Image: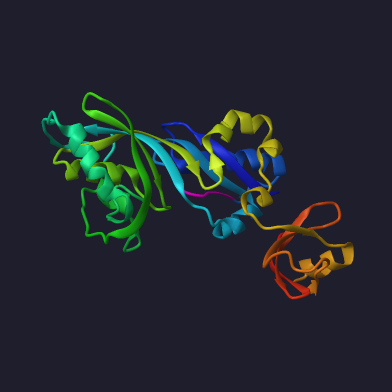
Amino acid sequence: MIGFVNVFKPTGPTSAQLVARLRRIYGVYANDRHIAVGHLGTLDPQAAGVLPVAVGKATRLIPLLADQRKAYAGVLALGRATTTQDALGETTAQADVPENWQRLLEEAIPKFVGRIEQTPPMFSAVHYEGRRLYELAREGRVVERNARPVTIYSLDVLGVEERAARLRVTCSEGTYVRTLFADLGDAIGVPAHMAALVREASGPFVLAEALTLDEITDNPTGALIPPEHIIPFPTIVLDLRNVVDFRAGRVVPLPEGAPAKHVFVRDESRTLVGLGETHGALLAPKKVFV
């Protein structure tokens, strides 16, 4: 079994909890309780939206995903900062919101578009001396973190309410949107936090096509997206003899020239057998799915 699933994550459960549920679903279906399942980028418990998941041998293809751009819609709440930079944390600062906060926000936004430096929050899964930062944060510890470069491709105001703004963010992989929102508050001189967040897209996975766990449970195979639909490599078909050699790790003749540097390889029954790398008129196994 191999493929990707576009899961809709509701608010509440962690990304790891959803992955565990999917492992049970596909483990039962494939009669393999140790089946590999992994997500392509965590979502905070408070956040909802797109959670791409790789199933089976597709977990080996995750490094090949070139498009890791994310899109979010969220609510920036002004007047209160928290330990977690979202609505679930304990209050660390409060202040009145100035009447001209909308103008200040519009003036601050351009400074956050493009390549910026961002310090990971203490409540995050970043490793520090062999432990996760959130583990240290729960112990009341605060440690020095190095700032990391991220890219904000766009940052737009969708609407405003009393002491809150709805924003849409398109950003690179590794961006902490709640940190972005807290930094926006700092830029306009007001404590702030992320009140709500929905991930609208993650690479080629979009919210309109995301499936709930119930929908996936009802049709596990129908929920699987073939790797070729996610990773834009062409597909070639090998005959039985060459499939046997390919699976054994041997170089085989390329049947129709070299359509690209990397190609998905299927057998005559259209079963995906691996990923190949072309070398002139030859095809070398790069990843083999047994």
Q: Nearer the viewer, residue 74 or 215?
A: 74
Say left or right for 73 vs 251: left
Which residue lies at the image location 22% right of the left edge and 23% below the top edge? Answer: 162
**Which corner quadrant of the image does residue 63 belong to?**
bottom right
Q: Residue at x 27, y 52 (%)?
A: 136
The image quadrant that residue 13 belongs to is: top left
Where residue 57 sits in the image (x, y, percent)? 65, 55
Q: Position of residue 140 (x, y in %)?
A: 21, 48
Q: Is residue 277 magenta?
A: no
Looking at the picture, tell me which residue is in the foreground, 1 or 27: 1
- Between 236 and 5, which is closer to the camera in this rendering? 236
Asked whether residue 191 is in view, the answer is yes
Viewer can see residue 19: no
Q: Is residue 39 magenta?
A: yes
Q: Tell how many labels.
A: 0
Q: Position of residue 183 (x, y in %)?
A: 23, 46
In the orientation shown, which residue stands out farthest toward the top? 162
- Main secondary-structure element of the magenta-colored stretch: strand
Q: Residue at x 51, y 41 (%)?
A: 51
Q: Is 157 positioned to the left or the right of 100 in the image?
A: right
The percent coordinates of residue 285 (x first, y second) are: 72, 69
Q: What span is colored magenta in the figure?
A: 37-41
The correct choice, above or below, for 86 with respect to 270 in the image is above
- Image quadrant for the C terminus? bottom right
Q: Is residue 10 left or right of residue 146?
A: right
Q: How is the image coloured?
A: rainbow
